[in-house]
Amino acid sequence: MSSELIVRLNPQQEWRIDLSRLEPMGVEAARQWLDVQFTTLECEPLRASGKVLLADKVLVVAQSAGPRLLGDEDWRTTYARATHAILVKPLITVDVAAMAVTY
């Protein structure tokens, strides 16, 4: 079964990661990795309540990572593996410009 993650910062900057060839990441490891990135990149919660949903975390981490980190193949691959592990969908699109995660 094929799996893919698409990260779109804007119409000119998009990365497609084929997840079917990557080693899966465990859910707990994925949560921990995203938590570390959220803190390291000094991300802010999207909701006024301060609650951070997993899809929100995936979105703001990509937003804060920007082209610098998304352009790094190792970081991008780990991000893709973590995102897939926690959202568990075959096709995931993280559209930072639209502030949306779709599957």
Image (cartoon, rainbow, N blue to C red):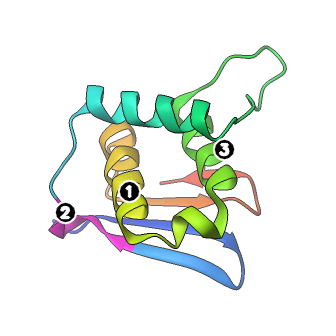
Which region of the structure is painted magenta? 17-22
Which residue is at 33% across, 36% downward?
30
The one of 39 and 86 positioned closer to us in this rendering: 39
Which residue is at 64% across, 41% downward?
41
Tag 3: amino acid: Val
Mark number displayed over residue 48: none
Q: Name the spot of residue 77 as percent of width and height, x first.
A: 34, 62
The mark that comes first in sequence, 1 or 3, is: 3
**Circle 1: is it few (<14), some (14-19), or many (20+) Cα within 10 Å?**
many
In the image, taking residue 24 as reference, residue 100 lies left or right, namely: right
The one of 17 and 42 positioned closer to us in this rendering: 42
Q: CA distance from mark 3 to mark 2?
A: 23 Å
Which residue is at 53% across, 66% downward?
70
Tag 2: amino acid: Leu
Q: CA distance from mark 1 to mark 3?
A: 14 Å
Secondary element at tag 2: loop
**Marks 1 and 3: CB-CB under 8 Å?**
no
Secondary element at tag 1: helix
Would you place residue 41 above or below residue 31 in this image?
below
The mark that comes first in sequence, 2 or 1, is: 2
Q: CA distance from mark 2 to mark 1?
A: 9 Å
Which residue is at 38% across, 56% downward?
80
Would you place residue 1 above or below residue 27 in this image?
below
Residue where numbered disc 1 is placed: 80
Q: Name the spot of residue 64 as percent of width and height, x first.
A: 68, 50
Would you place residue 2 above or below residue 57 in this image?
below
Residue where numbered disc 2 is placed: 22
Tag 1: amino acid: Ala
